[in-house]
């Protein structure tokens, strides 16, 4: 119970936050100019009287304000995010259909950037001041400064158009009819370019942060104690410095993890990746309110879930947290 | 006795641009089996550098540029790094000053001790743990099995230092280097750690190089003493010889700086109180939330006392006794939960923000850390005039007064145009005192105001405070953990323990005939207390 109590507290807070977001969503619909029904129907391109009347009834727009709010929130609780007139399908179906592609892309990018970033950061800090450190930090700065869409376009140009090594767009080869391992291999080939472009920026961030944090922790008293014990350099770095230096990186990784769902709009658009990001982009362009709000809610839920997960991970890596409060 | 370590003509070069070319210039010393050599000096004397050089732990840029340190027939200074690494922790071990930061916060105590065996490829995992457990038991940690699984933050300062010692003893080193291991600890804890080191020396017969700035500690444990000043050994000999017949002027200055039981003359005090505390309480609550019980700490628990005009009241106690919270409450940096803080009849605790701002000048504080308590980007003049100007004093008048005060605290008026970093710790503390005086307070709260200073500097600042008290009739609430410092300056002493006022009385009464057991424990724990008492009797006879 002692372990579960803080998680329970977080869950209660998370539910309250989600509810607040749903209410905010509701006000966003109402903030759009004109009658929401006209907006919803009109933007869908089918603004005849009969449909608007249907919409009014469906959303209860003839009801008083608080009843409307109540029924909207009730719909959300039942996971009913409404209907996309543009796409001709329920919003939830649209999102669930796109979710796996996005998660495959963002999770791969996340894992690549985190492991490579930390490894390179540790390597750079161990060689601080030497030429190899300068090369690594300069590269990191370059990746950090490169706009994502530019890197993506260049990657397509070089590896797909010029060299022809990897497919430049899509999630899998359309109409190839692969199955089993062949299909997985096909997806992986499609994944390499978007995942590495997406991961590049965060890899640079993790590397710089790991390096700085390692150097800072290396100055601390307990590192001197470790040396006085007769431990070797690599052991000190792994067991003493890295373990402490990783804490701020975990914080940042938690922030990135929260963006796993909504954070790949650019990459998905450039690589024509059929994920949530592109769904959001298309809905924005088409002013498909219901879908946008659905994506908004799901992304927010993801941020909250990953915040809780980050907290739990933090409790694992730092025993002081939780025990002190 | 077999010689464990023999240092000959050791020189340690500082990087270019340092305040002097050598941290240590040509010192020699020997330590025999079972012998404790105290290396005494103030900050910057090169005593820690000597220890770090032996361990091969010198900071980057600092190098040994002469001399030998012979340990077991070979010069450790000229050994290759891999060989030195084998010596570290196994045959030469070291403990450090700050037990709070010297342990890895993310590793269990047991792991950290067992790691010493792993570092030297000794034993298997089970045996390592078994041996770690017996070490934890040997250094007198309570509930060893539980301590093994604990993280450093779950231990007190004294317990952490014991864990450090356990780590250092793991492989039965022939030489233990202790770098100010008790400086950060309370007196009673310090006494226990010193006792532990003496006991281990007896049982294990190891040589100990004990670095300290405190001659009281020297009197407790040293067999031999070497006194260092600015990298040079100015005096060395047996503990008895150095303590009783110091030859060098610097040694005498250091010895004079610690009071050997000389208590100040009792002064006649006025009756008009400048400060009255009535039933003061402050409770800190931590944690507490939807699913958790809040934890309460009674930092100040029903404390009532008065300070007369022109009186210096010493407030002593160990860490966590609530003495700092009390001081902060008097300045109302902390608002008490109950009780009154009467300064000249006004209850500071009951004032609104606006009224408080107008009354802030009545009580001023001098802080512990002279490095952190002055804004590094403000010139001294600004630091001294900001307060008075905010109180509505004309700027020109405040500046003239500031220059005058700088003269009074012994810095000279020209100090006004300089920045804090241009001053030493002792000088900054003088600035801190001038800053407090600039507000023309009725009472000054000095919270550990001399604790961060070297003994000789400490003596100078105490002189200044005595002088100010005589000249300006200053009333001071002097908060300190150091009973010896309190004895030098205070008219009366108040002893606090766990938020409660244990005993309060004249300095002679408290020191010579303490009524409460806790006060007696505190006095007995003062390092060098016996030696000081001997001196006192000798002085009398």
Image: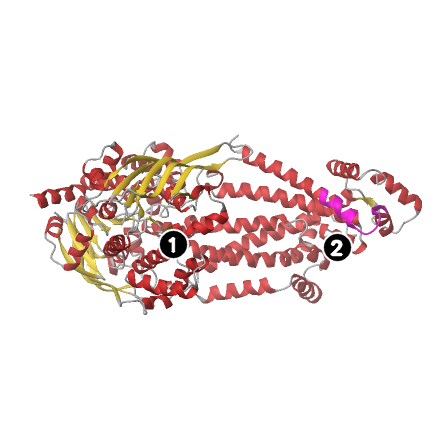
Most foreground residue, B144 or B515: B515
**Disc 1 residue crowd, few under 14, some 14–19, many 20+, Cα 10 Å:** few
**Disc 2 residue crowd, few under 14, some 14–19, many 20+, Cα 10 Å:** some
Q: Chain of mark 2?
A: A
- Residue B312 at x, y = what percent? 28, 46
Specify the farthest residue to the right: A49
Q: How many marks?
A: 2
Q: CA distance from mark 2 to mark 1?
A: 50 Å
Picture disc at residue B245:
none
Marks 1 and 2: in contact by CB < 8 Å? Answer: no
Q: Which residues are magenta?
A: A23-37
- Residue B42 at x, y = what percent? 24, 56
Residue shown at 55% from the left, 64% from the top: A141
Most foreground residue, B530 or B51: B530
SS type, badge 1: helix
- Residue A23 at x, y = what percent? 72, 42
Most foreground residue, B473 or B248: B473
Say whether residue B344 is visible: yes
Which of discs 2 and 1 lies nearer the camera? The answer is 2
Say whether mark 1 and mark 2 are on the same chain.
yes
| Left or right: where B226 falls relative to B53 | left
> Dividing the picture into quarters, in which one does residue A160 lie?
bottom right
């Amino acid at each position: 119970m002692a372990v579960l109590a803080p998680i329970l507290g977080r869950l209660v807070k998370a539910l309250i936050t989600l509810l607040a977001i749903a209410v905010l969503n509701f006000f966003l619909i109402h903030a759009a100019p004109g009658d929401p029904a006209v907006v919803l129907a009109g933007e869908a391109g089918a603004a005849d009287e009969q449909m608007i009347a249907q919409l009014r009834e469906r959303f209860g727009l003839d009801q008083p304000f608080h009843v409307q709010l109540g029924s909207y929130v009730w719909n959300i609780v039942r996971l009913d995010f409404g209907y996309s007139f543009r796409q001709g399908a329920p919003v939830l179906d649209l999102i669930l259909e796109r979710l796996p592609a996005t998660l495959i892309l963002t999770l791969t990018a996340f894992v690549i950037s985190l492991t490579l970033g930390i490894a390179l950061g540790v390597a750079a800090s161990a060689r601080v001041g030497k030429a190899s450190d300068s090369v690594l930090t300069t590269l990191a700065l370059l990746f950090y400064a490169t706009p994502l869409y530019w890197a993506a376009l260049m990657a397509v140009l070089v590896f797909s158009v010029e060299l022809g090594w990897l497919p430049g767009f899509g999630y899998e080869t359309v109409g190839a009819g692969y199955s089993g391992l062949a299909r997985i291999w096909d997806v992986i080939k499609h994944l390499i370019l978007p995942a590495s472009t997406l991961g590049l920026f965060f890899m640079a961030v993790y590397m710089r942060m790991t390096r700085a944090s390692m150097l800072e922790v290396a100055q601390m008293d307990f590192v001197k104690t470790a040396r006085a014990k007769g431990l070797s350099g690599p052991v000190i770095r792994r067991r003493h410095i890295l373990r402490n230096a990783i804490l701020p990186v975990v914080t940042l990784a938690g922030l990135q993890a929260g963006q796993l769902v909504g954070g790949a709009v650019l990459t998905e658009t450039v690589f024509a990746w059929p994920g949530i990001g592109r769904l959001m982009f298309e809905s924005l362009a088409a002013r498909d309110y219901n879908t946008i709000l659905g994506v908004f809610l799901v992304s927010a839920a993801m941020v909250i879930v990953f915040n809780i997960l980050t907290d739990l991970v933090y409790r694992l890596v730092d025993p002081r947290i939780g025990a002190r409060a | 006795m077999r010689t464990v370590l023999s240092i000959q003509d050791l020189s340690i070069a500082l990087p270019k641009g340092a305040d002097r070319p050598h941290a240590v210039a040509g010192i020699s010393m020997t330590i025999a089996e079972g012998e404790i050599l105290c290396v005494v000096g103030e900050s910057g004397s090169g005593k820690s550098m000597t220890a770090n050089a032996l361990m091969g732990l010198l900071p980057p840029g600092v190098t040994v540029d002469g001399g030998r340190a012979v340990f077991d027939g070979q010069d450790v200074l000229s050994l290759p790094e891999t060989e030195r690494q084998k010596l570290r922790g196994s045959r030469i071990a070291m403990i450090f000053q700050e037990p709070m930061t010297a342990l890895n916060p993310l590793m269990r105590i047991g792991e950290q001790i067992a790691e010493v065996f792993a570092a030297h490829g000794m034993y298997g995992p089970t045996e390592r743990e078994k041996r770690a457990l017996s070490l934890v038991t040997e250094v007198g940690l309570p509930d060893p099995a539980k301590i093994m699984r604990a993280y450093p933050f779950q231990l007190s300062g004294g317990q952490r230092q014991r864990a450090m010692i356990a780590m250092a003893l793991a492989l039965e080193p022939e030489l233990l280097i202790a770098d100010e291991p008790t400086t950060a600890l309370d007196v009673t804890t310090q006494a226990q750690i010193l006792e532990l080191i003496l006991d281990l020396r007896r049982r294990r017969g190891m040589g100990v190089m004990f670095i300290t700035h405190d001659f009281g500690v020297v009197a407790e444990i040293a067999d031999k003493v070497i006194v260092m000043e600015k990298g040079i050994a100015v005096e060395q000999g047996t503990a008895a010889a150095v303590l009783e017949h110091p030859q060098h002027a610097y040694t005498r200055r250091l010895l004079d700086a610690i009071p050997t039981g000389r208590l100040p003359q009792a002064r006649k005090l006025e009756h008009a109180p400048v400060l009255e505390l009535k039933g003061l309480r402050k409770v800190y609550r931590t944690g507490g939330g939807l699913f958790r019980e809040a934890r309460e700490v009674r930092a100040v628990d029903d404390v009532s006392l008065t300070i007369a005009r022109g009186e210096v009241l010493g407030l002593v106690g160990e860490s966590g006794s609530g003495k700092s919270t009390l001081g902060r409450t008097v300045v109302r940096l902390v608002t008490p939960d109950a009780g009154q803080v009467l300064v000249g009849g006004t209850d500071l605790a009951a004032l609104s923000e606006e009224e408080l701002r107008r009354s802030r000048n009545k009580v001023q504080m001098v802080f512990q850390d002279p490095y952190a308590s002055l804004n590094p980007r403000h010139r001294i003049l600004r630091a001294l005039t900001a307060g008075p100007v905010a109180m509505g004093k004309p700027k020109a008048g405040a500046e003239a007064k500031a220059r005058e005060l700088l003269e009074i605290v012994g810095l000279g008026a020209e100090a006004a145009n300089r920045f804090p970093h241009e001053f030493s710790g002792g000088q900054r503390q003088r600035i801190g005192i001038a800053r407090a005086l600039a507000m023309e307070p009725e009472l000054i709260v000095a919270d550990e105001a001399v604790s961060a200073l070297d003994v000789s500097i400490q003596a100078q600042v105490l002189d200044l405070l005595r002088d100010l008290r005589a000249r300006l009739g200053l009333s001071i609430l002097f908060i300190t953990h150091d009973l010896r410092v309190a004895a030098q300056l205070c008219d009366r002493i108040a002893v606090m323990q766990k938020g409660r006022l244990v005993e309060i009385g004249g300095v002679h009464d408290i020191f010579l005939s303490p009524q409460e057991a806790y006060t007696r424990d505190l006095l007995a724990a003062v390092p060098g207390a016996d030696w000081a008492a001997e001196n006192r009797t000798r002085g009398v006879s």
